[in-house]
Image (tube, grey):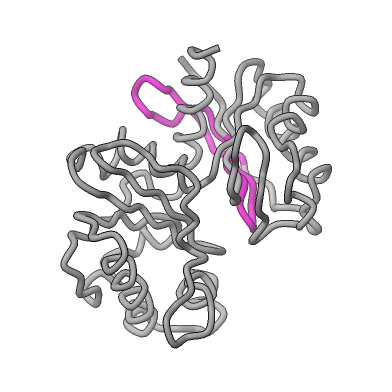
């Protein structure tokens, strides 16, 4: 069964068809820059364009970089503040004329990695997936079960006077032109805090930097095992499609 997954990020909105039985990505990915300002109406227009690009009629899974409860976005860290309290699922459903299911972007990536990627062999204990991009997304699993909407990227860094994503996101690495060792030192401090709070068995590192894992992994000195995401930057798309299929079955 092929389902369209759409991943909304702070810099780009990308979609691709997914075989939800195998996690395999079908065809080419289609990406459109996130509009500025990224208002609900403007983002919905891009989602419609992606649906039309694939000439797609069916359920759609959409990830969003925010707390998402019952289809409503409750935060807006890297998108327009107009999304706070917005009925995102209803907005996308009405714009596309299709059944749309919305979830947190890192939760989607985590579900995909735990099912088809790096998390398959870690179904016992505590696993934390962290995606490093414009911000930092997070998903935590206990014995393979997701606790949604954790938003660990907004945990304050001790003595730094800022949230984690303002200290060690990939965006910060690029803006400050940090070399991999210098950036890894920041990431390691963040992982140390996560270890203190949650004592995870495994960290899965996702987002765009996962393609460069070997550049910074040697500088991470944590007790927990640290592995790169296997689905790389497409994990959110896969997880979104999986969620759409799950909701289709439930309803």
Image: magenta residue range? 6-30
Residue 186, quarter of picture: bottom left
Name the residue furthest right.
41
Q: Above or below — where is 208 with respect to 178? A: above
Residue 143, quarter of picture: top left
Q: Above or below — where is 35 with respect to 163? A: above
Q: Is residue 132 left or right of residue 216?
A: right
Identified at 20% across, 75% down, the residue is 221
Q: Tell me the quarter of the image containing the C terminus.
A: top right
Instruction: Give percent across and percent down for residue 183.
Output: 39, 79
Is residue 172 on the magenta stretch? no
Q: Above or below — where is 250 with respect to 52? A: above
Identified at 60% across, 28% down, the residue is 101
| Main secondary structure found in the magenta portion | strand
Identified at 69% across, 28% down, the residue is 51
Q: Is residue 112 left or right of residue 133?
A: left
User: In this view of the protein, which residue sits in the foreground, 81 or 97?
Assistant: 81
Q: How many marks?
A: 0
Instruction: Give percent across and percent down for residue 177.
Output: 50, 83
Is residue 10 on the magenta stretch? yes
Q: Is residue 158 left or right of residue 172?
A: left
Identified at 79% across, 52% down, the residue is 82
Instruction: Give percent across and percent down for residue 235.
Output: 43, 42
């Amino acid at each position: 069964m092929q389902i369209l997954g759409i991943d909304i990020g702070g810099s780009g909105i990308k979609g691709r068809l997914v075989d939800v039985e195998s996690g395999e990505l079908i065809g080419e990915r289609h990406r459109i820059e996130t509009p500025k300002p990224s208002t609900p109406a403007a983002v919905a227009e891009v989602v419609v364009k992606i649906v039309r690009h694939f000439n797609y009629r069916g359920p759609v899974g959409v990830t969003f970089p925010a707390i998402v409860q019952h289809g409503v976005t409750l935060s807006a860290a890297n998108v327009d503040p107009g999304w706070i309290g917005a009925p995102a699922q209803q907005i996308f459903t009405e714009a596309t004329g299709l059944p749309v299911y919305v979830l947190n972007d890192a939760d989607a990536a985590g579900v995909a990695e735990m099912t088809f990627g790096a998390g398959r062999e870690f179904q016992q204990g505590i696993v934390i997936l962290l995606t490093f991009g414009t911000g930092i997304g997070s998903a935590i699993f206990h014995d393979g079960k997701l606790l949604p909407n954790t938003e660990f990227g907004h945990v304050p860094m001790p003595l730094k006077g800022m949230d984690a994503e303002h200290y060690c996101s990939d965006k910060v690495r690029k803006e400050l032109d940090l070399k991999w060792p210098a950036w890894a030192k920041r990431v390691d401090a963040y992982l140390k805090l996560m270890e203190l709070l949650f004592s995870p068995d495994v960290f899965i590192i996702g987002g765009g930097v996962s393609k460069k894992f070997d550049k910074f992994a040697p500088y991470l000195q944590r007790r927990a095992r640290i592995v790169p995401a296997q689905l790389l930057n497409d994990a959110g798309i896969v997880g979104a499609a999986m969620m759409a299929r799950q909701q289709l079955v439930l309803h």
